[in-house]
Image (cartoon, rainbow, N blue to C red):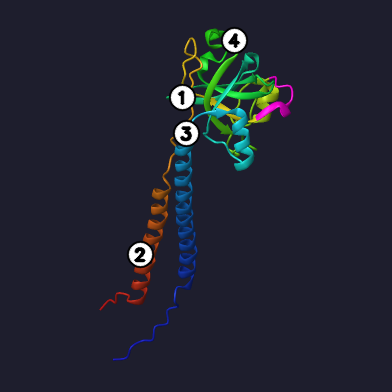
Amino acid sequence: MVTKPDTRRFPWGVIVVYLICLGILLSLGTWQVKRLFWKEELLASIAENIKAPPVSVAALEGILKQTGSVEYRPVTATGTFMHEGERHFLATFKGEAGFYVYTPMQMEDGRFVLINRGFVPYGRKDPQTRLEGQLDGPVTITGLARDRLEMKPSSFVPDNDPAKNIFYWKDWGVMAETGGVPDLETLVPFFIDADDTPNPGVLPMGGVTNIELPNKHLEYAITWYGLALALTAVVGAYLWRWRYPKTTP
């Protein structure tokens, strides 16, 4: 019996495509693992920060100079609200559409800080519909500090519309300038999210800071690694059939 020589070419194209795809899938999985470690460290840092006692604005500015961040650190500030300068950040709270109200506060030392006083429903954007909550005179606010953003977080986020007083991202400088802060040099370089201490008339509703950040990076890593394993199984099965083809009698 004479055996015909195998003249088939080895499927190098399949191997090349497989290696490229495998490299991409493994890279994505490894990236998600790194993101997982980063997110766990971030969540641990947040948990530690929010348990600290509130400090003054001046003390927090010192921390900002040392660390470059004051995210989620408790802080207290005393001053007078400039209600005519409140800025409105489009948001949802407990499933309802509306706005977070950012109001400039002039502190006792003459400087200003932007306070996120909390949420108002869409139909209560006009301050005239919630006059009870427009606090007069010196008040003390306790809350969590939030870092300012240096730029729009994503190209998918719409541009702010200061003329209509609707903000889609927290542009610290523009919010302050359009809110009547005379000089950015007098503006504290972070925001403060007020706690859930009730305001007269309920609105704005404070305590809106979201500290429950999603952490699905382990799931994503398993998905990418699983796809890499599945791809390897498929290619392996293909090569097995190529190497040992079924012959018809």
Place of residue 217 in the rendered image (x, y in percent of width and height, measured from the top left): 43, 48
Q: Pointers 3 and 4 in contact (CB under 8 A)?
A: no
Residue in view at x 57 percent, y 8 percent? 128
Residue in view at x 53 percent, y 11 percent? 133
**Cα distance between the residues tagged 4 and 1:** 26 Å
**Cα distance between the residues tagged 1 and 2:** 46 Å
Foreground disc of the pair 2, 3: 3
Nearer the N terminus, badge 3 or badge 4?
A: 3
Callout 2 amino acid:
Ala
Nearer the N terminus, badge 4 or badge 1?
A: 1
- Mark 2 = which residue? 233
Q: Nearer the viewer, residue 87 or 239?
A: 87
Nearer the N terminus, badge 1 or badge 3?
A: 3
Residue 146 painted magenta: no
Callout 3 amino acid:
Ile
Q: Which residues are magenta?
A: 180-188
Element carrying mark 4: loop
Place of residue 149 in the rendered image (x, y in percent of width and height, measured from the top left): 62, 36
Q: Which mark is residue 50?
A: 3
